Amino acid sequence: MDNYAILLLGSNIDPFVNLKNALELLYCSLSITKTSQIWVTEAVGNAGPDFLNTAVEVKTGLNSIQLKKKILSPIEIGLGRVRTSDKYAPRTIDIDIIIFNSQVVDTNIWEKAFIALPISEIIPDLMNNSTGKTLLETANKLKSSAKAELFKGS
């Protein structure tokens, strides 16, 4: 059975190179069906450098636990991700499952611009049942109060 997941990738240590490498590794392991543009957002919870964030929709036969354990975590480790007690510390790469089979896994999608903006490009009509707003409406509102812009570099 095919499962669909929307993943958020983020990096603020050599971010363009690390995002590119992570995407290449994901392409080798999963069927990527959609990708967002790359967004520049300020670091949250830490005075570190800005993050680059992008989102991808993937199709996989794995469940969410297998996806994290067999694909995502090894990519993070392979690209030098070091986990510390500071969950906001700068990182080479972070790959999170935000939506799995149409179910929101990370409710921060409705509160954080760095999640909402790239994911809203993939699934703009996702509805927040508590507010009645779509993800695109939420992302646009969050963008106006956050330092977030499309990445223009290479």
Image (spheres, rainbow, N blue to C red):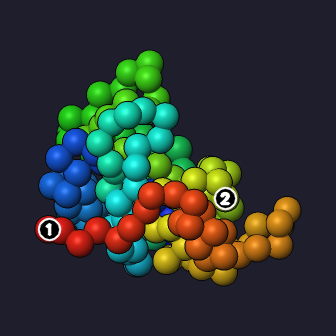
Q: Quadrant of residue 17?
A: bottom left
Q: Residue 20 vs residue 97: left or right?
A: left
Identified at 23% across, 72% down, the residue is 152
The N terminus is located in which quarter? bottom right
Q: Position of residue 115 (x, y in %)?
A: 52, 58
Marks 2 and 1 sit apart, C-alpha to C-alpha, by: 29 Å
Quadrant location of the C terminus in the rendered image = bottom left
**Amino acid type, residue under disc 2 in the picture:** Trp
Question: Taking the image as drawn, is residue 121 in sight?
Answer: yes
Q: Amino acid at mark 1?
A: Ser
- Residue at 66% in and 81% down: 125
Is 44 left or right of 47, judged from the image as shown? right
Near mark 1 (Cα within 10 A), the count class, few <14, some 14-19 or many ≥20, is: few
Report the disc number at residue 143. none
User: For this view, does 25 lie left or right of residue 98?
Assistant: left
Q: Look at 32% across and 48% down and name the residue there.
A: 50
Write the residue at 36% across / 40% down: 73
Q: Nearer the viewer, residue 84 or 5?
A: 84
The spot of residue 151 in percent (x, y) is 29, 68
Reading the image, the residue beneath label 2 is 110
Residue 151 is left or right of residue 36, and the answer is left
74 above or below 64? Answer: above
> Which residue is disc 1 drawn over?
154
Closer to the chain start, of discs 2 and 1, is 2
Q: Is residue 9 visible?
A: no
On the image, the x and y values in percent for residue 56 come to 41, 68
Q: Characterize the local packing of mark 2: few (<14), some (14-19) or many (20 or more) Cα atoms within 10 angstroms.
A: some
